[in-house]
Image (spheres, rainbow, N blue to C red):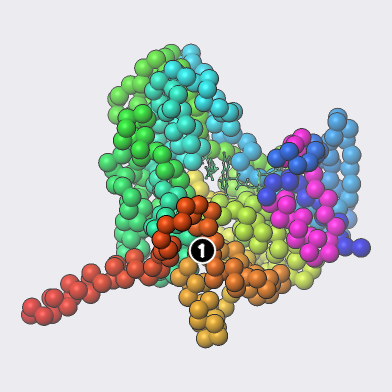
């Protein structure tokens, strides 16, 4: 019989973990505290404690305590995969806003927002320019009397619909872009990044420009927001300096009067209340995990956290690769580096993350670099130079095209025979559902055009310069 693995949470991370366990012959048991996940299952089992079994240093086993219908139970597991998510506990920084205690209107976190109807005719202030704040504010702009978003540091706001109508990430998250970002001088790569983020509209003109423009913090994806600002149904304001009983005074001295409701779209804090802090929280109250997955100082590598990273790429392929690796480590077919090497790697990565993403986003990571790292641990990383020699057609798609999850099913364990064809047909398949009225042939975007444009201009200038002297 395979090792018994406890999986905490039945979101996408939990489901990826169940699948990886089954693929590797382990025996998963999933615990989920919600009653009903997408109408699929009835769960309602809270994991209230995970403790090392008394002989942990020999067996690596865990005592997992659960609560269901008020009844506590305990069971021993050979390993634990924590898939409890990091958008669970609202961050409500009320102390950051002087005078908030005086405010007489309603005040709640975006997690409690359910529907726009009850805001008809109301004056609403949304705090925070993340995806939650923008989704809520644009929705409310159709019903509320007036909506304002207050932003502390601005955000890049991207359209989901990019060149030739393809999704933004298909054109933006490519191996070629990543290669250039990692190899061009910082000044050029920052300049190009800012230029691309401003491609649809100039963020200064809409009051959205991030204070630190070159930080690669998570953009907001919202096609409606710029249009709402342009039409005047929504305004962007700086951070709130002070609240009064009925209004908010912003840092620029302007005032939003007669506010009915303040919505804190201020994100989430992470917490693992079922786990002893010493296991994964050790430095400046930060979660310290090797590759965002493994607590580095355990005597036995029988615990992994799946889904505790934030990248520009899609969540599902990320947690899928994390689970594939974690399950192999638990099974013993992959081994982890020494504690010292893992701690060194954590420190090195932390420095890089601060540089690229800033202080508040240390769970953020690069997508392709991270995926390649994970894939290389299990032998599923595509060998690009070899691919160019053996299958150039596929290599061009893999290097210049979107980094779709099939790339990590081309080789190694979990290899899928359909992966090559899936990559070669991804452009057509993306537009299939949108072409419900046939008019002309679909255009595949030119993968190199943007970069050719970038380099052609300087080359032209140099050529003209030399021609003139
Ligand atoms: C409003 C909103 C919109 C989002 N939209 C997108 C999007 O469009 N695309 C995207 O990629 N990401 C989106 N995200 C991020 C999204 O949360 C993650 O991509 C995804 O849900 C992560 O899945 P997960 O399984 O890791 O965590 P979750 O989906 O949070 O699942 C964790 C599960 O663990 C359970 N759990 C927690 N603690 C316990 C416990 N002690 N015992 C038992 N069960 C427990 C929870 O009930 C939950 O069901 C969004 C987030 C928010 C807040
Ligand atoms: N449609 C979607 O795809 C969708 C929808 C909702 C959420 N999500 C995802 O869910 C995750 C959470 O999103 P989120 O928008 O809830 O949170 P978030 O991305 O963490 O954004 C939080 C916002 O609140 C601000 N903030 C935090 N603390 C503050 C303080 N003390 N004072 C002033 N401002 C403060 C932040 O400003 P700073 O930038 O200055 O820190 C930021 O603008 C993200 O990964 C997001 O992509 C996705």
| Residue 170 pos. (x, y %) | 48, 60
Q: Which residues are magenta?
A: 13-37
Instruction: Judge the density around disc 1: few (<14), some (14-19), many (≥20) Cα neighbours within 10 Å.
Output: few
Residue 135 at least partly seen: yes
Tell me what residue is drawn at x 13 percent, y 80 percent.
466
Q: Residue furthest left?
A: 469
- Decide whether residue 447 is among the magenta residues: no
Q: Secondary structure at mark 1?
A: helix
Residue under circle 1?
428
Relative to 257, residue 164 above or below? below
Which quadrant does the N terminus fall into? bottom right
59, 263: nearer the viewer: 263
Which quadrant does the C terminus fall into? bottom left
| Residue 312 pos. (x, y %) | 50, 54
Q: Describe residue 235's horizontal placement relative to residue 91 as left or right.
A: left
- Decide whether residue 21 is among the magenta residues: yes
Q: Residue furthest right?
A: 1
Relative to 356, residue 43 above or below? above
Tell me what residue is drawn at x 77 percent, y 71 percent.
333
């Amino acid at each position: 019989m395979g090792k018994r693995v406890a999986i905490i949470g039945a979101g996408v991370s939990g489901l990826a973990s169940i699948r990886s366990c089954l693929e590797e012959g382990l025996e998963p048991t999933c615990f989920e505290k919600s009653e009903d996940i997408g109408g699929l299952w009835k769960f309602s089992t809270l994991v209230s404690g995970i403790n090392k079994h008394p002989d942990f240093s020999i067996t690596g086993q865990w005592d997992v305590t659960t609560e269901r219908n008020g009844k506590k139970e305990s069971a021993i597991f050979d390993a634990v995969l924590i898939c409890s998510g990091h958008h669970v506990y609202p961050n409500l920084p009320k102390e950051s806003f002087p005078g908030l205690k005086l405010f007489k209107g309603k005040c709640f976190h975006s997690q409690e927002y359910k529907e726009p109807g009850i805001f008809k005719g109301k004056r609403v202030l949304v705090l925070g320019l993340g995806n939650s704040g923008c989704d809520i504010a644009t929705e409310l702009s159709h019903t509320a009397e007036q909506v304002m978003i207050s932003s502390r540091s601005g955000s890049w706001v991207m359209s989901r619909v990019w060149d030739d109508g393809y999704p933004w990430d298909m054109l933006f998250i490519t191996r070629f872009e990543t290669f250039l970002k990692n190899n061009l001088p910082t000044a050029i790569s920052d300049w190009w990044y800012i230029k691309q983020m401003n491609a649809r509209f100039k963020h200064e003109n809409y009051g959205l420009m991030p204070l630190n423009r070159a930080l690669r913090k998570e953009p907001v994806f919202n096609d409606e927001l710029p249009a709402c600002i342009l039409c005047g149904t929504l305004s962007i304001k700086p951070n709130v300096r002070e609240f009064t009983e009925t209004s908010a005074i912003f840092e620029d001295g302007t005032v939003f009067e007669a506010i009915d409701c303040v919505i804190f779209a201020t994100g989430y804090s992470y917490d693992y209340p079922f786990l002893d802090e010493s296991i994964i929280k050790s430095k400046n109250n930060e979660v310290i995990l090797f590759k965002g997955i493994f607590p580095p100082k355990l005597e036995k590598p029988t615990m992994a956290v799946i889904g505790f990273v934030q990248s520009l790429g899609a969540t599902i392929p990320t947690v899928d690769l994390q689970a594939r690796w974690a399950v192999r480590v638990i099974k013993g077919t992959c081994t982890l580096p020494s504690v010292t090497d893992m701690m060194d790697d954590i420190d090195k990565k932390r420095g890089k993350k601060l540089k690229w993403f800033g202080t508040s986003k240390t769970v953020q990571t690069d997508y392709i670099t991270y995926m390649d790292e994970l894939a290389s641990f299990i032998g599923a990383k595509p060998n690009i130079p070899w691919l160019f020699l053996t299958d150039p057609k596929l290599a061009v798609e893999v290097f210049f095209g979107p980094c779709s999850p099939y790339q990590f099913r081309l080789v190694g364990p979990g290899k899928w025979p359909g992966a090559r064809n899936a990559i070669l047909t991804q452009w057509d398949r993306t537009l299939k559902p949108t072409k419900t009225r046939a008019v002309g042939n679909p255009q595949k975007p030119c993968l190199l055009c943007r970069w050719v444009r970038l380099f052609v201009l300087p080359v032209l200038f140099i050529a003209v310069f030399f021609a003139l002297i």
